[in-house]
């Protein structure tokens, strides 16, 4: 069973759970499932906890997954520059692009001039997933219509009128992630620099702050992300579509076979004129990945370091070949053993007679065939570091990958001496047909890839990211702060692969405006052929962060 399923297995039997499910046969569902969104064999469902085990054990189910956290790949500027223009440029165009832009993120300032043409909003709909339920087909959140937004724009207090404030979590006026990304992708030039897709209609999913099966998370999760993709594609109808997702964490297997990534590939291969663009992540220097090869009976020690006084949960994932068997010993900072595990047995981690975590061990996860160890530590840690000792019991392959999951409240790390910076792409960007973008410094003539921009390849050796784009101190639309009633003519500067991805997304929209029926293979070919080759004589590993090279908009045909 999926480790996250085991965590939510016990509790109120009447509580409704949201899950992702892969069927053995399309349209052949087990009992007690409410289907929310559907992508061939993969569906998102809602069910009561009492039915979880029967669904999991159904012969109709190939894989069942609990939600996994999908945080935003936020900017890495600690103090982004914010600038107010004296006046805005008036945008009076009635022209509408034939290509729709979809975005899954958070904090969309519909009152910002960059998203208003001729006094009317360019948003077709905004689904605020964390808002009060309005009776929509998905069973949660509120869907705001274009007419409602246009009516709110006429009001002195548009956010209050609509009941949606995009900057409610922005206490310091640095601007929300979603508004900044949106401005790069399809800003009309009223305030921020004009994008390559200034007249595209926008369909937005605001993941906001969501409760996932009883846990309060910082952003969204894989189930709500899949529902968001379904919502966008359904709203777009038959029109060409580009979706941007500057989202993702550290963990999972990096084979591109999470159910979320399989959904991405399903959408772009079953729908002509469609591309999904993703940021590679900002994790190259996160010290959250290590890998190696273990031999029979060999013991490999992996030091796991925690922040002082960290009271947040911590998680490590270890993935290894399905034909191998590893066991795990865990030692605290005094080298006292906390756990001596039995392979494929779930066991509590006990320190000073107190339960401080759990080690979950799964044999042959159904989507990858890999074995999976999850070490989950609660907030009672009170340690500086642990040592995770892997022991090779049966070894035919020997390769293992370890990831520490992202934790914005107290990030733990591997000892820097054992860190490996390759294979650090974000947790949901490793599918076969997504377009994944890294970031470089466009203000430097040498065009260095930014130090934080994540590195490929995927765990199965494929190229990700596939290209790089400008990502250093990018000026774009700044949303209203929590203290403001309407957007002013503000710009803000942010850096990150989150900023590089929408730049590429706008170029893909430019491609589809000319050739709206291109399939994803042709879209990728056109895009990658417009890259200037990257060469790294001093550090050949940099090619794993550059892919096909630097996107050149002048070469887009």
Image: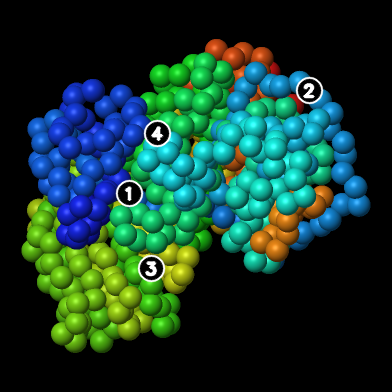
In the picture, the disc for residue 414 is 3
- Residue 342, compared with residue 189, is above or below; it is below
Residues marked 4 and 2 touching at CB (< 8 Å): no
Q: Which residue is mark 1?
A: 67
Residue situated in front as seen by the camera: 151 or 322: 151
In the picture, the disc for residue 137 is 4
Q: Which residue is drawn at the image coordinates 35% and 32% (left, top)? A: 37
Mark earlier in primary sequence (1, 2):
1
Mark earlier in primary sequence (3, 2):
2
Residues marked 3 and 2 touching at CB (< 8 Å): no
Task: Tell me if residue 248 can be seen.
Answer: no
| Alpha carbon separation for disc pair 4 and 1 | 19 Å
Label 2 secondary element: loop
Q: Residue 183, position in %: x, y?
A: 70, 42
Query: Where on the picture, by quarter, is residue 336?
Result: bottom left
Q: Which residue is mark 2?
A: 94
Residues marked 1 and 2 touching at CB (< 8 Å): no
Few, some or many residues within 10 Å of mark 1 (<14, 14–19, 20+): many
| Alpha carbon separation for disc pair 1 and 2 | 41 Å
- Residue 319, compared with residue 379, is above or below; it is above
Left or right of 37 on screen, residue 159 = right
Q: Residue 122, position in %: x, y?
A: 69, 32
Q: Residue 38, position in %: x, y?
A: 33, 29
Select label 4 or label 2 by which is in front. 4
Q: Residue 379, position in %: x, y?
A: 33, 75
């Amino acid at each position: 069973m999926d480790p996250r399923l085991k965590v939510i297995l016990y509790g109120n039997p009447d509580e409704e759970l949201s899950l992702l499910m892969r069927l053995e046969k399309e349209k052949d569902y087990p009992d007690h499932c409410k289907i929310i969104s559907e992508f061939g064999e993969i569906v998102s469902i809602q069910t009561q906890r009492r039915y979880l085990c029967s669904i999991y054990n159904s012969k109709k189910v190939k894989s069942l997954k609990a939600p996994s956290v999908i945080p935003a790949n936020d900017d890495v500027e600690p103090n982004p520059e914010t600038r107010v223009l004296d006046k805005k440029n008036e945008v009076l165009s009635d022209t509408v692009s034939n290509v729709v832009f979809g975005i899954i993120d958070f904090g969309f300032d519909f009152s910002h001039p960059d998203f208003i043409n001729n006094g009317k909003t360019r948003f077709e709909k905004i689904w605020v997933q964390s808002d009060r339920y309005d009776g929509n087909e998905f069973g949660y959140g509120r869907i705001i219509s274009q007419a409602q937004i246009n009516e709110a724009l006429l009001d002195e207090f548009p956010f209050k009128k609509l009941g949606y404030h995009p900057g409610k979590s922005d206490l310091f006026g640095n601007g929300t992630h979603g508004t900044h990304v949106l401005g790069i992708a399809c800003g009309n030039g009223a305030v921020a620099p004009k994008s390559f897709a200034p007249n595209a209609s926008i369909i937005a999913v605001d993941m906001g702050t969501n409760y996932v099966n009883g846990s309060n998370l910082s952003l969204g999760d894989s189930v709500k992300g899949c529902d968001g993709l379904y919502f966008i594609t359904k709203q777009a109808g038959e029109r060409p579509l580009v979706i941007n997702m500057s989202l993702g964490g550290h963990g999972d297997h990096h084979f591109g076979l999470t159910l979320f990534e399989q959904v991405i590939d399903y959408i772009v291969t079953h729908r002509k004129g469609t591309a999904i663009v993703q940021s590679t992540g900002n994790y190259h220097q996160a010290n959250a990945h290590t890998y190696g090869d273990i031999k029979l009976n060999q013991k490999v020690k992996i030091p796991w370091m925690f922040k002082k006084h960290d009271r947040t949960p911590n998680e490590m994932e270890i993935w290894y070949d399905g034909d191998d068997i590893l066991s795990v010993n865990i030692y605290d900072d005094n080298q006292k053993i906390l756990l001596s595990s039995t392979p494929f047995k779930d066991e509590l981690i006990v320190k000073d007679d107190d339960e401080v975590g759990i080690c979950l061990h799964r044999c042959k996860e159904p989507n990858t065939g890999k074995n999976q160890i999850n070490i989950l530590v609660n907030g009672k840690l009170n340690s500086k570091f642990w040592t995770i000792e892997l022991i090779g019991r049966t070894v035919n392959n020997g390769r293992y990958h370890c990831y520490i999951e992202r934790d914005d409240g107290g990030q733990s790390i591997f000892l820097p001496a054992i860190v490996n910076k390759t294979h650090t792409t974000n947790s949901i960007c490793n599918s076969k047909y997504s377009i994944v973008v890294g970031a470089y410094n466009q203000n430097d003539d040498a065009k260095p890839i930014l130090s934080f921009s994540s590195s490929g390849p995927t765990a199965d050796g494929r190229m990700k990211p596939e290209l790089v784009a400008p990502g250093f101190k990018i000026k774009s639309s700044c949303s209203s702060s929590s203290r403001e009633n309407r957007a002013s003519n503000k710009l803000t500067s942010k850096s990150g692969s989150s900023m590089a991805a929408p730049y590429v997304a706008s170029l893909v929209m430019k491609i589809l405006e000319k050739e709206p029926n291109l399939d994803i293979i042709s879209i990728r070919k056109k895009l990658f052929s417009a890259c200037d080759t990257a060469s790294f004589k001093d550090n050949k590993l940099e090619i794993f962060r550059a892919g096909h090279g630097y996107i050149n908009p002048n070469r887009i045909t």
